Amino acid sequence: MPPQAITAKLTRRIPLTDDVYELQFQLLKPEEISFIAGQFVTIKVEDGNPKLFFRSYSIMSPPSQKKIISTCIKLVPAGRATPWLTTVSEGTDISMMGPLGKFVFHESPNKRSIFVATGTGITPLRCMIEDQLEKGNTTDMHLIWGFRFEKDIFYTEELDNLHTQYPNFTYTITVSRPEEEWKGSRGRVTDWLKANIATPAQTQVYICGVGDMVTDTATICEEIGMAKEDIHFEKYA
Ligand SMILES: Cc1cc2nc3c(=O)[nH]c(=O)nc-3n(C[C@H](O)[C@H](O)[C@H](O)COP(=O)(O)OP(=O)(O)OC[C@H]3O[C@@H](n4cnc5c(N)ncnc54)[C@H](O)[C@@H]3O)c2cc1C
């Protein structure tokens, strides 16, 4: 679907951690949207500043939910869009443009898919994973999701439910600065990839997050033997 102007009501803002929120929107105009999992919308920031300003947010809800969209955002206190998005009243009509973007899933029946995220980089990946599972994709899909501290972790219940319903989906959370008692994976997502990709030629990877993590991960995937065309990424900033 070509990008179009969208008006959507912010129906709910759910705090997930100290600084991460899920935003849920109900579409008003148009009332439904078609998009490809992994795409994003660009939101018009109407914070009272007369200078026009837009910021992009990946769609997290799967394309099967045509009347609503959700996203997941991290508050950047010194930023412009997120202080507004984390305080604007529920019920406000928000202007956006979409769907946009080419970070989408490539069906490869003979390949395992690895999804690599840090923080809110989960947003388009969760959409892709749920979409593929809903469509009956039974290939092996693994999410490796990195956080700095345990207090930053969210959506474990949702991911556990997804795994229970679709056992071909599994996930690992890795924490780079855990407490001593942390029993899960330790280190960065790149450490996990170096230790766990046994068959790089049969693996495709989808990477999303902020800055250097994305480029570092893509480089490591290449170094461990994955084909360039199997390495897909979206960089937030
Ligand atoms: C295609 C696309 C999709 C995106 N989807 C999402 C999404 O689903 N969720 C989301 O939270 N962000 C997403 N972003 C980032 C988003 O567009 C904004 O850049 C971000 O919300 C910060 O906006 P801001 O105006 O508040 O701060 P800015 O003034 O734009 O940012 C200040 C600084 O914050 C850093 N920063 C930006 N994003 C993050 C982040 N998520 N975590 C930590 N530091 C950050 C940057 O290094 C930047 O220099 C996406 C970006 C792109 C290009």
Image (cartoon, helix red, strand yellow):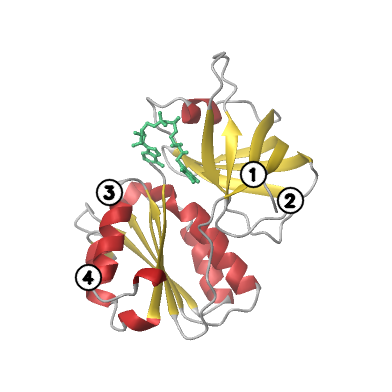
Callout 3: helix, strand or loop?
helix
Q: CA distance from mark 1 to mark 2?
A: 9 Å
Q: Earlier in the sequence, mark 3 or mark 4?
A: 3
Q: Going 49% across and 41% down the picture, which residue do you hit?
A: 73
Query: How many angstroms separate mark 2 from mark 4 (CA)?
Result: 39 Å
Residue bearing mark 3: 212
Question: Which numbered mark, 2 or 4, is in the foreground of this view?
Answer: 4
Which image quarter is the C terminus in?
Answer: top left
Q: CA distance from mark 3 to mark 1?
A: 26 Å
Q: Amino acid at mark 3?
A: Asp
Secondary structure of residue under mark 2: loop
Location of mark 2 (residue): 33
Q: Secondary structure at mark 1?
A: strand
Contact (Cβ within 8 Å) of mark 1 with mark 2: yes
Dot 3 crowding, Cα within 10 Å, few <14, some 14–19, many 20+: few
* 123 relative to 226, above or below: above
Which percent across, then down, holds residue 119?
39, 49
Along the viewing direction, whichever of 163 and 30 lies nearer the viewer = 30
First of labels 1, 4 by sequence position: 1
Mark 2 touches mark 3? (CB < 8 Å): no
Image vertical order of residue 79 relative to residue 210, above or below: above
The kind of residue on which mark 1 rests is Gly
* Spatial CA span between label 3 and label 4: 16 Å
State the residue position of label 4. Answer: 223
Q: CA distance from mark 2 to mark 3?
A: 32 Å
Look at discs 1 and 2 and give the one toward the viewer: 1
Q: Answer with mark 2 or mark 3, whichever residue precedes in sequence.
A: 2
Q: Residues within 10 Å of mark 1 (few under 14, many from 20)?
A: many
Q: Which mark sits nearer the N-terminus, 1 or 2?
A: 2
Circle 1 residue: 98
Dot 2 alpha-carbon crowd within 10 angstroms: few under 14, some 14 to 19, many 20 or more:
some
